[in-house]
Image: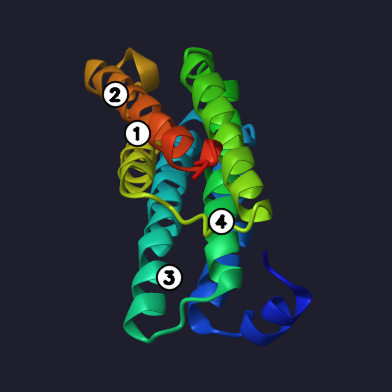
Amino acid sequence: MITFRDVRRDWAKLPNRITLLRLVMSFVPGSLILIDWDYDSMILIRWVAAIIFAAVSFTDYLDGYLARKYNQVTKLGQFLDPVVDKVLCVVNLIALSLRDPLVWIFAVFIVIRELSVAWILFQANRRGQEAAVIYSGKVKTAVVALVMTMLFLPIGGTSNVCVLDLIVIATAISIISWFHYVRKYAYVQVE
């Protein structure tokens, strides 16, 4: 379980600062596309939002890489990283859904998955189990980030067949990842 001492000691480490920057920047792409721009400006804004979203998503890889490379893996980082990932995903899916109603189907599924995984990890942590992100969760995060980046682009959203195919793939990977979390953390093995 993370303590105040962990937070006080670890918040200034570079990987954790990158994670906190990701948290703050999580709200920018969705906010940009929700503003009523004229048509020409909206095309540019969607490109800007997609680039910002992709860059912010990349920091998820970057902070983990730096933490491992410089031996700065912390309890704070292990707690914050998945929480911030969920904020980035949920906030922007809601914004995208407000612009493209078909995204709601994908968004509702992903939001339920994200919240249930967060609950599973929280409960595992409360039981004293070391609850870390698993590989299929990392794959899910990358694929969903790709889909969401494409949804930000002014390329037709869910009317684009390529985007729809990626949504189906991302949904399948999300289901598989959810089962992996349930199997690993939701049930305590009795010995």
Residue 56 occupies which quadrant of the picture?
A: bottom left
Q: How far apart are marks 4 and 2 (CA)?
A: 38 Å
First in sequence, mark 3 or 2: give its number. Answer: 3
Q: How far apart are marks 4 and 1 (CA)?
A: 32 Å
Q: Nearer the viewer, mark 3 or mark 4?
A: 4
Secondary structure under badge 1? helix
Amino acid type of the residue tagged 3 in the rendering: Asp
If the image is split into quadrants, where does the N terminus sit?
bottom right
Amino acid type of the residue tagged 4 in the rendering: Gln
The residue that label 3 is drawn on is: 63
Residue 99: x, y in percent?
Answer: 55, 23
* Labelled disc at residue 129: 4
Amino acid type of the residue tagged 1 in the rendering: Val
First in sequence, mark 4 or 2: give its number. Answer: 4
Q: How far apart are marks 3 and 4 (CA)?
A: 23 Å
Residue in the image at 34% along x and 28% along y? 176
The residue that label 1 is drawn on is: 147
Of residues 56 and 65, which is closer to you in this image? 65
First in sequence, mark 3 or 1: give its number. Answer: 3
Residue 183: x, y in percent?
Answer: 43, 34
First in sequence, mark 1 or 2: give its number. Answer: 1
The residue that label 2 is drawn on is: 163
Asked whether the viewer can see residue 49, the reply is yes
Whether the residues at callouts 1 and 2 have beta carbons within 8 Å, the answer is: yes
Q: Which of marks 4 and 1 is in front?
A: 4
* Labelled disc at residue 30: none
Q: Along the horizontal axis of the image, is 144 left or right of 118? A: left
Asked whether the viewer can see residue 32, the reply is no
From this view, report whether residue 77 is shown above or below residue 156.
below
Is disc 3 surrounded by few (<14), some (14 to 19) or many (20+) residues within 10 Å? many
